[in-house]
Image (cartoon, rainbow, N blue to C red):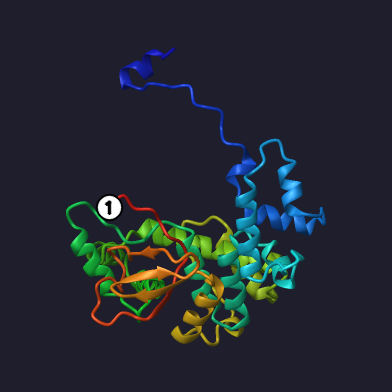
Amino acid sequence: MLNSDEEELGVYKTITKEPTPEILRLSLQDLVLRVKICKLGSAEAVLLEALDPPLSKNIQRALDSLIDVKALTASEELTPLGRQLAKLPLDIFLGKLILLGSIFKCLDGALTIAAILSSKSPFSAPIGARSQANAARLAFKRGDSDLLTVLNAYTAWKRACGNSPSFEHQFCQKNSLIAQTLSSIEELKGQLLGSLVEAGFLTLDEGEIHALQMFRSYSSKRRWVVIPERYNAYDNDLILNSILAWSFYPKLLKRDGKGWRNISNNQIVTLYPGSVNKDVEKPPKWLSFYHIMQSSSK
């Protein structure tokens, strides 16, 4: 029954269905890696013994993805990369991205992009003003990359934050950016840096550890993630684009007439309206991507 307060507010409670079992909500790629780390044998055999087992085809799809990114061998044995990915709180593609970012000394960009892809878009797209929002996004265009374009907007926001709070507010309004989302991206970036350190993949000196701890501690004062220069000496577009393509492989689109073909399954896809490559005169021949979404529009 509803209490009087709920009735006044017009709140109606419904009995929800039994929640989805955790094994069906978690990434199967993560579960497969856990099975392999624990040396439990065949991942499919172990997962099918669960009370609410996933479908065999989904388990196989997860295994194929892990083999594609070289986390498992063809015989489903863990690789050194797979052992590292299992320590990170990210899916395998973003985990590989930040690992490669540290190896090729472009960690700041790699961490920021991983945080961006783990968050909501920092661009607002209000109904009735989407053309203006798309124009604001294009003002930050960086090469042929949507991800580098968002990274460019994030970098410009950080510069704007060096001025007064009112200037930051004006900057975000003018450029259709959401300050709260950008702040969340910065916070997540710090968490991912900490994960790399805790996994033993990065080594920080005492001063760098203190700086990271200060960032992660609560404070009303704005703080920024500080990346050691030795892990960020080559933060440029060529290297960033290279490790993005390497991390997301085999997620590739090839130009096919006026559309794009997903090389993994030969399906024809279209770019979302806000893409910097949408309806351009000379689009690139290849694009890498992180995910594809279903659309009801024709």
Residue 281 lies, with reference to residue 248, above or below; the image says below
Pinpoint residue 22: horizontal percent, then vertical percent.
62, 41
Residue in view at x 31 percent, y 79 percent: 283
- Residue type, label 1: Ser
Name the quadrant containing residue 106.
Answer: bottom right
Q: Nearer the viewer, residue 117 or 199?
A: 117
Name the quadrant containing residue 216.
Answer: bottom right
Q: Nearer the viewer, residue 227 or 74?
A: 74
| Neighbour tally class for label 1: few under 14, some 14-19, many 20 plus, Cα within 10 Å | few
- Confirm whether residue 221 shows in the render: no
Residue in view at x 77 percent, y 65 percent: 77
Pinpoint residue 228: horizontal percent, then vertical percent.
59, 79
Screen quadrant of the C terminus: bottom left
- Confirm whether residue 177 shows in the render: yes
Asked if residue 21 lies left or right of residue 156, the reply is right
Pinpoint residue 263: horizontal percent, then vertical percent.
47, 70
Residue in view at x 60 percent, y 70 percent: 96
Residue in view at x 72 percent, y 40 percent: 50
Q: Which residue is mark 1?
A: 297
Pinpoint residue 262: horizontal percent, then vertical percent.
44, 68
Residue 6 lies, with reference to residue 192, above or below; the image says above
Determine the residue located farthest toward the left in the rendered image: 128
Q: How many marks?
A: 1
Screen quadrant of the N terminus: top left
Asked if residue 145 lies left or right of residue 87, the reply is left
Asked if residue 187 lies left or right of residue 230, the reply is left
Q: Helix, strand or loop at disc 1?
A: loop
